Image (cartoon, helix red, strand yellow):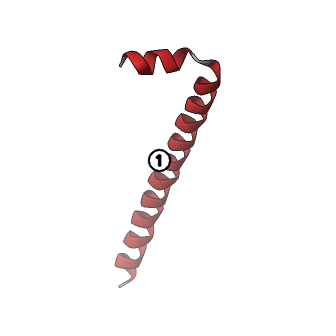
Amino acid sequence: MKKLKELGMDDEFGMYYDAEIVHRKEVNSARSDGRKEGRKEGRKEGASN
């Protein structure tokens, strides 16, 4: 934990860390949107059968 705090104080590492956090949030959001769309399409297909 101490090492993470030290790295958090480093400007260069902090920039990479922040970029990684943003990337992970974007990926998770895209996955969530994909699941929602898949469920919606599945309900449509199920209703038409």
Q: Is residue 27 above or below residue 21?
A: below
Q: Amino acid at mark 1?
A: Asn
Q: Is residue 47 above or below residue 7?
A: below
Q: Residues within 10 Å of mark 1 (few under 14, many from 20)?
A: few
Q: Quadrant of residue 39?
A: bottom left
Q: Is residue 17 above or below residue 46?
A: above
> On the rendered image, what quadrant is the C terminus found in?
bottom left
Task: Name the residue: 40% across, 78% down.
Answer: 45
Q: Residue furthest bottom?
A: 49
Which residue was labeled with disc 1?
A: 28
Q: Secondary structure at mark 1?
A: helix
Q: Is residue 42 left or right of residue 21?
A: left
Percent from the top left, x then y, of residue 40?
A: 43, 65
Percent from the top left, x then y, of residue 7?
A: 51, 20
Q: Nearer the viewer, residue 27 or 5?
A: 5
Percent from the top left, x then y, of residue 27?
A: 52, 49
Task: Name the residue: 59% across, 26% down.
Answer: 13
Q: Nearer the viewer, residue 18 or 11?
A: 11
State how many labels appear.
1
> On the rendered image, what quadrant is the N terminus found in?
top left
Task: Name the residue: 48% across, 15% down.
Answer: 6
Task: Name the residue: 43% across, 21% down.
Answer: 4
